[in-house]
Amino acid sequence: MADSDWGSGAAPSFTKIIFSNVHPAIDPGNAIIPTGFLVYVVGASRGIGAGIATSYAKAGASLIMLAGRRTSGLEAVAQQCKQIGKAKDIQILVARCDLTIPSDIESLAVQTRGNSS
């Protein structure tokens, strides 16, 4: 590849088949979660954390607590969870938390204890 071509094309595929649909065995919508299941996702404002939160909503979690440093991102993920949630009475709670600040962690624990019963 010439220097002038660098970055101009797509990366070569190392697989013969590329799947675009989720296999039923790992689809969160097919999961069975017990009633009253509480999920706590730290770092849920974007990326993998947001994906984990929405997967639990699809699977039927009834209470999802989202925590992260940016509440704007958390609110957007909370809306997504409510829209795609399997549980009709899904409850989404959002908390701002920086895991490097001990007082944030303590308040998060207090909030968790208050909502887990």
Image (cartoon, rainbow, N blue to C red):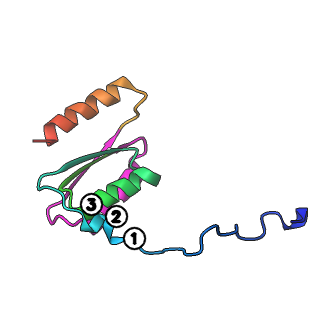
What residue sits 36% from the left and 37% below the top?
Answer: 97
Residue furthest to the top in view is 102
x then y, percent, for residue 84: 28, 68
Residue 76 on the magenta segment? yes
Quadrant including the N terminus: bottom right
The type of residue carrying mark 2 is Ile
User: Pointers 3 and 2 in contact (CB under 8 A)?
Assistant: no
In the image, 64 versus 13, the foreground residue is 13
For label 2, the SS is helix
Bounds of the magenta segment:
67-96
Q: Is residue 104 left or right of residue 109?
A: right
Q: Are marks 1 and 3 in contact (CB under 8 Å)?
A: no
Q: Is residue 80 magenta?
A: yes
Vertical comparison of 90 with 23: above or below:
above
**Percent x, y of residue 99:** 40, 32
Tell me the amino acid under the disc marked 3: Ala
x 25%, y 68%: residue:
30
* Residue that label 3 marks: 57
Of pointers 3 and 2, the one earlier in the residue sequence: 2
Marks 1 and 3, the one that precedes in the sequence: 1
Residue 35: % across, % down: 11, 56
Q: Quadrant of residue 4?
A: bottom right
Which amino acid type corresponds to the residue marked 1 in the rendered image? Val
- Tag 1–tag 2 contact (CB < 8 Å): yes
Residue 36 vs residue 75, the one in the foreground:
36
* Disc 1 target residue: 22
Find disc 2 in the rendering and name its residue.
Answer: 26
Q: Which mark is residue 74?
A: none
Which numbered disc, 1 or 3, marks the residue closer to the eye?
A: 1
Residue 82 visible in the displayed image: no
